[in-house]
Image (cartoon, coloured by chain):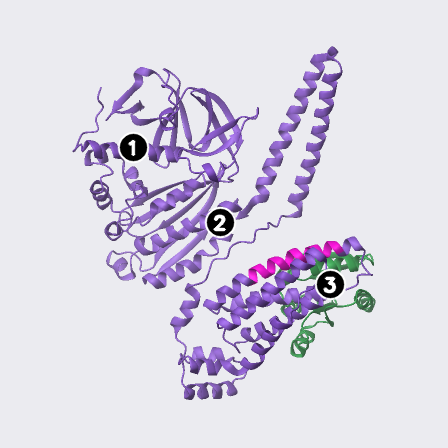
Chain colours: A green, B purple
Amino acid sequence: MKTILIVDDSPTIRKLLTYVLKKQDYIIAEAEDGIDAMEKLSHVQADIIIVDLNMPNMDGIEFAKSLRSNFYYMDTPIIMLTTTKDDELKRQALEAGVNLFLNKPIQPNILLYKVQSLLMGVE
Amino acid sequence: MGNEFLQDDEMQEIINDFIVESGELVENAIQDVVEIEQNQNEETINSIFRAVHTIKGTSSFLGFSVLSNLAHKAEDLLGMIRKGEIIIDKEIADTLLEALDMTRTIIEEIKEHGAEKQDTSVILNKLEILSKVEKKMLGEILIEEKIITKKELENVLDKQKEDKSKRLGEIVVEEKLITDKQLDNILSKQKVHKDDQTVRIDVKKLDELMNLVGELVLGRNRLIMVKNMAKRGSSNTKGSIDSLEDVTNYLEVITNEIQLSIMKARLVPMSKLFNKVPRLVRDLCNTFTKDIDLKITGEETELDRSLIELLHDPLTHIIRNSVDHGIETPEERKKKGKPGKGLLSISAYNEGNHVIIDIKDDGKGINLEALKEKVVEKGFMNESELKDLTEKEIMNLVFIPGLSTAKTLSSVSGRGVGMDVVKTNIEKMNGQAYIDSKQGEWTRLSIKLPLTLAIMGALMVEIGKELYAIPLSNVIELVKLKKESIKSVNKNEVLMLRDTIIPIVDVSKVMSIGVNGSAGGYLVICKIGEKIVGVKVGSVIGQEEIVIKPLGEFMGNINGICGATISGDGKVILILDIPAMINSSYMHKIHKKKEEKSEGQALALQQ
């Protein structure tokens, strides 16, 4: 089974995503911001990471950057799921190493599909 | 999103979560808006922005389009404030508050009816107007406020063209067109937030509790069974008594554990409080032109969350005192041969069931002579009485209410502004405060607090056929009282105990119970800080863990009583307020002294 790490500062969003993703038998780990996520990743092996952009302490772009400079997570797929529609931020995110930039709200099956296809790409 | 996709109960759970989370976010954001109206602080603006952003994201997910639209517009405006394109004024703050209020109303509606009904068009309009019209206004506002001239603005705009990454606001500050003072204002006025009323508990702790509650239910079942057994037939009385004993033991263990777990769940690290200290010290240093190094240790020490909140004011006061009156100015310090930078160290640590907080400064310490003078001048004690006090006891006189109101004291001795308030506050939390100092070198104020407020160990005593509880933390020993060992000093009863004179408080007199202290009985020796009193009681029942219940508003302020508890058989037992007793006996003494106008009457034993 694949493990998905959800990084979002809103517990509601985390729960929502968890419920959606659990429909497909994924193992879910949660973190509330970038720093927390880095910590989680030190003992949880994540196969794919879904991250919010705007978070306290360490935001999604910073987080993506530090993941990409980490040997173990150099090519773990990252989906950025955010409300922001700002093109500049999107560019920065993709530059930082985000694989996919999605806007909230997203249809559950689209998210599941994207997750699945990113995981397939890795295999 | 996906109402069809998720099951109804899942969806409902998520919506409930959303209501709680957003509610908290809105409350915090409202406080923050009030704060930034006074001073634009980047971190606070960011936190409002994030709150609104989160609400927008979550509500759009859940399909609450009105809410998400409102949050979206508010976010636009906040984004501009964040970028420094707009300066917050009353109008903007009002509109933001209005928008947040509306958000709250909508959340309430979702909670009540599951749908949004509010008409948000008015507020949406307002938000839009503000974020459109005022877009290029920073420069203009600065000119309007006569902070900078048109020419200066043009210069700044030119500079901005050279270096596009910089914001207008940044440049203006850099160019010293906005003074440091304005920046300082922002820092010094930083407001203390009220904590959110919800507690987040580690799931592990909650599971543990759940387990224990499960055990408790099992215990209840066993108890019911034993009852039925006893009811049905008394053929085996011994057997049922045995099993009753079993059950009570079992229940005792579990309740103890539950009590402990609940207490742990309420604990929060001191860092919650200590985090605010560096800023406070920094601002105070600015105000009083002092140079101080701050050292904080033990911020991981945990304390009941209600205590942490209550501790904020006294701690602020103590630190203020240390910086203002304790630590000298750099010049003075150098003259005295001390390092120019003062040192203020704050440490917290556990000691048994208590938490100790030490606040120590290496300032000028307490001037004992000046303090004594003041005490005599104010008529709290006379010279001969003072002679009998140890240095430590004298130092702790700074806590006498009324003494500290004198401003002259603070300038002479360098201590004591409102210290009695600090002490009363700490004692309200069932804690103790004492001071220690070496003149010219340091002062240390120690606060001793119980880990939790709600439950404490108590000594159950009987005074005139009534049961009372004395907080065990105050009790240091029990003495069997013999009539002949009671002496009288200035018409007050005292007991000589190993070279210490202990004043005796007769509760029956304080409470006007009207029972003459029967011969014999016990004296419960209590110590609060440096003061010792003996409380006369008829008999001692034993030690018990009691749950403190407040007395309620209509009789909350009875002197000498700090609460009540309920005994095993359902009786109400009053808890004696030892600090208040000490004070009242003390005040009584002073009062009497004034009446007698005794001059220099020696405090000698009248054998």
Q: Amino acid at mark 1?
A: His
Residue B305 appears at what percent x and percent y?
53, 46
Q: Are marks 2 and 1 on the same chain?
A: yes
The subunit letter for the residue under badge 3 reads B
Asked if marks 2 and 3 touch (Cβ < 8 Å), the reply is no
Task: Name the residue that disc number 3 marks.
Answer: B62
Q: Is residue B121 shown left or right of residue B39?
A: right
Q: Secondary structure at mark 2?
A: helix
Task: Name the residue that disc number 2 marks.
Answer: B309
Residue B502 appears at what percent x and percent y?
32, 27
Task: Residue at 29%, 44% (x, y): give it.
Answer: B402
Q: Nearer the viewer, residue B575 or B526?
A: B575
Task: Residue at 49%, 38% (x, y): give it.
Answer: B552
The subunit letter for the residue under badge 1 reads B
Magenta part of the chain: B12-29
Task: Name the residue that disc number 1 marks.
Answer: B588
Residue B374 appears at what percent x and percent y?
22, 44
Q: Amino acid at mark 3?
A: Leu
- CA–CA distance between discs 2 and 3? 36 Å
